[in-house]
Image (cartoon, grey):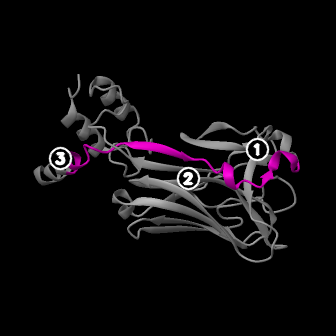
Amino acid sequence: MRIKLMIALTLAWGAMNSHAQFVSIDITPWTNENIRDWTAGNQYPTGNQTLNVRGVPMFITTSNNNANSLGVMVLPASGSTHAWDIPVNVTGAKTLYTLMNNAWGVCGRELGMIEVFGQNGSYASMTLIEGFNIRDHFNGNYCNSLTDPDAFAFEFGSVRLDQQKLELPESFLTDTITHVRFSGVNRNPDGAAFLASLTLQTCQGSNGDVNQDGCVDDSDMLQVLFAFGSDDPDSDVNCDGIVDDIDLLTVLFGFGHGC
């Protein structure tokens, strides 16, 4: 028991400078379609606002400065692979979140890929497979299944902006992401994927101040206790994907700091 406690205390001490933050990436310069013009598209929200999807802020943009639009990046109908490199410049990232669907397609087909590149060689990727982590934008006659446990069905009536989640290797915590690449092929009948939003979760300094009010006190302790056992990113001090003993001990070590 004493050994386990000492290990936990050591881990907590090393995590005292970590806290989850979110960085929204603006994809406006690369949008090429207004999906509010698509089937049942008027059910989509308009762009230039931030949606809360499972506690993650996801910024959606407009198309051609049209306030009544929702701009997305749709793979062009060229029949060959197309790729966009989206500049990022974010250090200490832990998780990548996207909002993606496809225009049409067949379940089981591979539509493309999301890749993350670090300045010092860190790399991660997510293959987009219809019916697994991406599906049709409209609940109609195409592929409507979403079986990836890390994907989240986010719906507006009969249309969707589903969320995907890519956990990044630990090397990204000390590396700077230079760009995110969205690539694939628009091919009939396979489908055409589109990207509507991109958010990175990072780890930043907190010393146990989970509510970021400048003081590590009872309110921080209660926040961690109420979130205990969950994956709440605002209470996951060491960014390991779960609120547990390590996060609670981090707050205890920092108790009184800044007060």
Q: Residue at x 79, y 63 (%)?
A: 143
Which amino acid type is marked by label 3? Leu
Q: Is residue 200 above or below residue 253?
A: below
Toward which corner of the image does residue 48 lie, by quadrant?
top right
Mark 2 or mark 1: name the one nearer the start of the chain.
Answer: 1
Name the disc covering residue 250, or none: none
Residue assigned mark 2: 97
Residue assigned mark 1: 70
Position of residue 207 in the picture relative to residue 38 (left or right): left
Which one is closest to the eye, mark 2 or mark 1? Answer: 1
Residue assigned mark 3: 9
Q: Residue at x 11, y 50 (%)?
A: 2
Q: Residue at x 75, y 65 (%)?
A: 75
Indicate the position of residue 159 as horizontal and vertical percent values: 79, 47
**Mark 3 closeness class: few <14, some 14–19, many ≥20 residues within 10 Å:** some
Q: How far separated are the C-alphas under marks 1 and 3?
A: 48 Å
User: Which element is circle 2 on?
Assistant: strand
Indicate the position of residue 203 as horizontal and vertical percent values: 37, 47
- Say which quadrant the C terminus sits in: top left
Toward which corner of the image does residue 177 lie, by quadrant?
bottom left
Mark 1 or mark 3: name the one nearer the start of the chain.
Answer: 3
Query: Relative to the observer, which residue lies in front, 29 or 49?
Result: 29
Which amino acid type is marked by label 1? Leu
User: Which element is circle 3 on?
Assistant: helix
Query: Relative to the observer, which residue lies in front, 145 or 16?
Result: 16
Which amino acid type is marked by label 2? Tyr
Query: What range is drawn magenta here?
Result: 11-39
Residue 230, can we see it?
Answer: no
Q: Residue at x 75, y 69 (%)?
A: 107
> Is residue 164 rendered magenta in the image?
no
